[in-house]
Image (cartoon, rainbow, N blue to C red):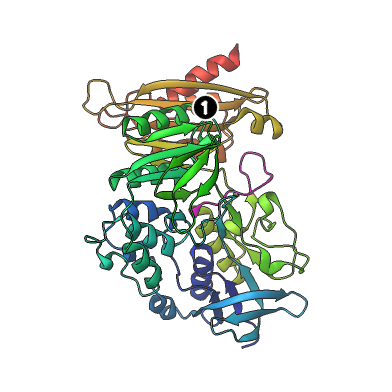
Amino acid sequence: MTDPFVVVGADAAGLSAASKCRREDPDRDVVVFEKGRWISFAYCGMPYFIEGRIARLSNLLSLSPSEVADRGIDLRRGHEVVGVDPEVKRVSVRTAAGETFEEPYGDLLVATGGRAVTGPFDVRGTDGAFTLHDMDAAAAIDAYVADPDEYDPDRADVSAVDRERVDHNAALPAPETAAIVGGGYVGVEMAEALTGRGLDVHLFQRSERLLPPFGEAVGERVEDELTDRGVTVHTGRPVEALVGDDRIEAVAVDGERFPVDLAVVGVGIEPNTELLSGTGVELGEGGAVRTDEYGRTNLPDVYAAGDCATAIHAVTGEEAWMPLGLTANRSGRAIGATVAGDPTPVGEIAGTAVVKAFDQECGRVGFLEEGAAIEAGFDPVRETITAGSRSGYYPGSAETDVTLVADRDTNRLIGGSIVGPDRAAVRVNTLATALEADLTVPEVERLDLAYAPPFSPVWDPILVAAKVLNGTLEE
């Protein structure tokens, strides 16, 4: 085997690429190295497992090692790629037993993902202090919040789980008060999850608004929703430190100690690119590996995809880094096709994202922050409207806030957000499509969107927002 397709990382991007390549070129050897035990898991489902909506950890697995093997892929768990030599096209691999060897490649995909940023907060070695970026952490938090006499060990029903860590946390006294550090995706979802497990939850956000990338309207609605559900929201109050030696005791805020017995730090992620150090690879936005429209790096026959790689922004045409699930799966699949001989673009991104905060559904796409839009070369104009989600006389209609942002010079739609309790999040897909098609606001206003009382009023909230914004642009 002298010309294999070697993949580093066995999650969304890596296994999508490996599977696609094997289907398109069944004679090609495909080797996937994964340094850990976990493969192909649903990161976005972990808060819902902790909340108890999902009964078993195994429900979050997409593929098992045996299913990967059935596809003809040589999967090697417990194998960490520690170096790449692009001149001789070879990777250096270290096994869990400490042995090292070299593996040649014809094409190489780096799909190493990202890792949780902890900033000044060191959660290592302190019981009750966690980040949430892997399945072992999800299993450990789930065990920690349970009453020791009631914990069901079968919830962590996967052989790959760190059983010692789970058992250790399951034996500890159940917490009563939780601090969540960070008001982004993880913070909002974990606030709901831990409230559902009966904890007194305090959410601390450094800035004055939750979910900053979603815009002001979403942030305000989500804060109100969390407050109504019993979460104490502390905006504009950055946590300075976690306090506690063996077990978390408090968080330090404004020079004072706020007693807690659980802390979850969710302040962002950063790309894993260390294995390419010294190769001359170009890094781009966010420190991620710079790639072109086919996922290629500047190194010959070396690709990158997923949370460790950049992509092209659909609105600006410029480089961007937005680590999201669809981006990883789609780019991996495209690279697999390209390596198999069918050049396939990885696709552009617009930052389309949704998040749930109890009953509030939130969606966003493109540019919402004025500063970011100006920096990208636009003259942003925005409008926010509130409209019913269905015909007013039909049961279930709910107020839906829609924010649209356009460029004054071209009338082009460049961003939008939606929030509301009645199927609001899925409406953002209409805006994502509009951005991909470079539609102007007048063109969005003229979209022939479906109408029937159970689903939408005659004028869908998106159309109402476009009509109002169009009037502003004409002033």
- Numbered marks: total: 1
From this view, report whether residue 34 is shown above or below residue 143. Answer: below
Along the viewing direction, whichever of 193 and 259 lies nearer the viewer: 259
User: In the image, which residues are magenta?
Assistant: 312-325
Could you tell me residue 192's position as x and y percent?
35, 43
Q: Is residue 121 left or right of residue 201?
A: right
Residue 45: tell me if it is visible: no
Q: Secondary structure at mark 1?
A: strand
Would you say 129 lies left or right of 321 here?
A: left
- Of the 4 image quadrants, the one containing the C terminus is top right
Quadrant location of the N terminus? bottom right
Identify the residue shown where x is 56% and y is 61%. Answer: 113
Q: Is residue 275 above or below residue 91?
A: above
> Disc 1 marks which residue?
404
- Estimate the x, y position of residue 112 in percent, counting from the top left: 58, 65
Q: Main secondary structure of the magenta part?
A: loop
Looking at the image, which residue is at 55% across and 63% down?
332
